[in-house]
């Protein structure tokens, strides 16, 4: 469903140095790795929010790098993007924030009532009660609810692909687990392909079909969670052990 072909990107230094990775139709694939390795940058190249310096990205068989504006718009209509901090507009109601996710071609053919029904359906999918939240502003919501509204905006256009950019960052353990359950629920209910950039390695290993590790500008590992845990690659092993130790400390702090 998504194929990254030798993707390169540099800013003041090289960040991605030939990343090749495929995300299969219908799967949940997690991208992990040390901070600052370019995980979110790779995710943004999918729909050309960031343009690679070299290489290509295919989305459902079409290049999102070497295409015209009309083709890029068609590709973006297939993709829902969940931003790290929900990225809601403070001055807009929940209804208006979510409705932004309905692409322009669809809004032209929808009445206000039909649009409201589509927004309500998206809110129900993320376990929010439409009549209780649609008229509220983001400031009136808890952090977990804001995250869910951000997810509702990503799915309201009925995409084929969901891109999750550190969607669980900043959440307490209860809300973190709730959002990860929501990822699995939506992947199943909406029949989408999910590509998840996350710092919650232990959670990703529990919910994803495969995991990829980005390190040194390239994919160091890709395979099932069991293979990731058992890998004898020194870089993978060090990362897994470090993340396991961090998770254990977090549990001790909670106790």
Image: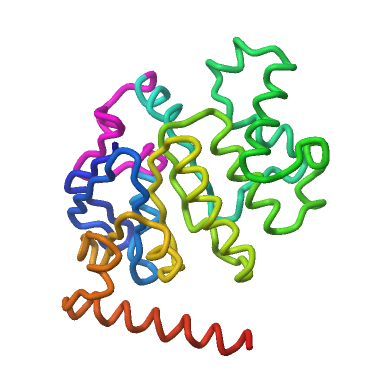
Work out whether 67 lies above or below 129: above
Q: Nearer the viewer, residue 4 or 11?
A: 4
Locate the N terminus and report the quarter of the image it occupies.
top left
Q: Residue furthest top?
A: 109
The residue segment tinted magenta is 46-70
**Would you say residue 122 sits in the magenta stretch?**
no
Who's the residue at 18% across and 80% down the image?
234
Image coordinates for residue 47, horizontal then vertical, percent: 38, 37
Picture quarter containing residue 33? bottom left
**Would you say residue 55 sits in the magenta stretch?**
yes
Image coordinates for residue 35, horizontal then vertical, percent: 39, 70
Work out whether 218 lies above or below 26: below
Work out whether 144 lies above or below 130: below
Who's the residue at 40% across and 81% down the image?
244
Q: Is residue 16 left or right of residue 252?
A: left
Picture quarter containing residue 254? bottom right
Image coordinates for residue 5, horizontal then vertical, percent: 18, 44
Work out whether 111 lies above or below 242: above
Who's the residue at 32% across and 61% down the image?
12
Image coordinates for residue 213, horizontal then vertical, percent: 28, 64
Q: Is residue 152 left or right of residue 8?
A: right
Q: Nearer the viewer, residue 52 or 172?
A: 172
Looking at the magenta stretch, what is its main secondary structure?
loop
Who's the residue at 68% across and 57% down the image?
144
Locate the C terminus and report the quarter of the image it occupies.
bottom right
Q: How is the image coloured?
A: rainbow
């Amino acid at each position: 469903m998504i194929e990254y072909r030798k993707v390169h990107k540099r800013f003041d230094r090289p960040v991605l140095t030939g990343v090749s990775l495929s995300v299969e139709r219908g799967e949940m694939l997690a991208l992990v790795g040390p901070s600052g390795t370019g995980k979110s940058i790779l995710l943004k190249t999918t729909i050309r929010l960031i343009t690679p310096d070299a290489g290509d990205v295919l989305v459902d068989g079409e290049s999102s790098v070497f295409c015209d504006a009309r083709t890029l718009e068609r590709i973006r209509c297939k993709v829902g993007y969940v931003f790290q901090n929900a990225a809601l507009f403070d001055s807009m109601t929940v209804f208006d924030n979510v409705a932004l996710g309905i692409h322009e071609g669809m809004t032209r053919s929808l009445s206000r009532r039909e649009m409201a029904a589509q927004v309500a359906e998206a809110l129900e999918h993320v376990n929010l009660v439409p009549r209780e939240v649609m008229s509220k502003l983001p400031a009136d919501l808890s952090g977990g609810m804001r995250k869910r509204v951000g997810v509702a905006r990503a799915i309201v256009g009925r995409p084929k692909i969901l891109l999750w950019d550190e969607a669980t960052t900043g959440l307490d353990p209860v809300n973190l687990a709730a959002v990860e359950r929501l990822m699995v629920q939506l992947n199943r209910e909406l029949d989408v392909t999910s590509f998840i950039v996350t710092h919650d390695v232990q959670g990703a290993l529990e919910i994803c079909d495969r995991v990829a590790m980005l390190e040194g500008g390239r994919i160091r590992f890709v395979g099932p969670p069991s293979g990731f845990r058992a890998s004898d690659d020194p870089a993978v092993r060090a990362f897994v052990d470090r993340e396991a130790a961090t998770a254990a400390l977090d549990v001790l702090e909670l106790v």
